[in-house]
Amino acid sequence: MRKIIKQFILISIVIFTISVNGQSKEEICKKWYLDGYIFLGIPYSPEKKEKNDFMNFKIDNTFTNMDEGVFGKGIWKWDMKNKTIYLSDNSAKESLPMKLIKLSKNQLIVLLEDEKNSIKVSFKTKK
């Protein structure tokens, strides 16, 4: 009986830790509309050609997106430990890492980086 109680307590602690310190895959799975960018601390609105851009993360680890009027699709992975979403499509040789900055019910902010620059991209659940 003590062993069962100890296991229950341990599982409860793990579940509580995950819910407090990390987001679950299910929280990411929805359609996110491009809201804007933050570059060098300055916010920018999407350009006219980006007004319908979106990312739609699905529970089966596939995604669809619209990028400047061009439809795309691929697969995605969630690395909860590093709080990073990895995107891959058929044309990419490597996956694109997007570091999670903020995730709430209505907002997703990710960080895109390369050797020289970084930019935050903000998405919302409604246009």
Image (cartoon, rainbow, N blue to C red):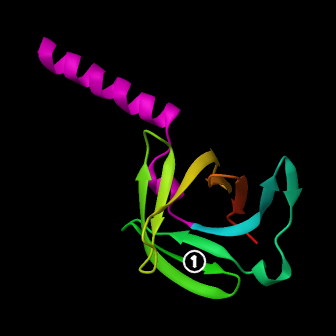
Decide if residue 60 is on the left or right side of residue 114. left
In the rendered image, the quadrant that contains the C terminus is bottom right
Outermost top residue: 2
Q: Quadrant of the N terminus?
A: top left
> What stretch of residues is rendered in magenta?
1-30
Q: Residue 12 versus residue 45: which sits nearer the camera?
A: 45
Residue at (51%, 53%) from the top-left corner? 27
Q: Secondary structure at mark 1?
A: strand
In the picture, residue 32 is in which quadrant?
Answer: bottom right
Instruction: Answer whether residue 3 is magenta in the image.
Output: yes
Number of on-image labels: 1
Q: Residue at x 13, y 16 (%)?
A: 3
Q: Amino acid at mark 1?
A: Asn
Q: Is residue 71 above or below residue 118?
A: below
Residue 90, position in %: x, y?
41, 80
Prevalent SS, magenta region: helix
Q: Is residue 110 left or right of residue 15?
A: right
| Residue that label 1 marks | 65
Give the x, y percent position of residue 120.
72, 53
Name the one closer to the observer, 6 or 77.
Answer: 77
Left or right of 97: which side holds 18? left
> Residue at 68% across / 56% down in the picture?
106
Left-right relation of 17 to 119: left
Looking at the picture, how far across and down is residue 123, in whole percent? 70, 62
Above or below, comparing residue 89 to residue 26 in the picture: below
How packed mark 1 is, by other alpha carbons closer than 10 Å (few <14, some 14-19, many 20 or more), is many
Q: Residue at x 63, y 53 (%)?
A: 113
Front residue of 96 and 53: 96
Q: Is residue 106 above or below residue 6?
A: below
Rendering coords of residue 62 (x, y %): 41, 72
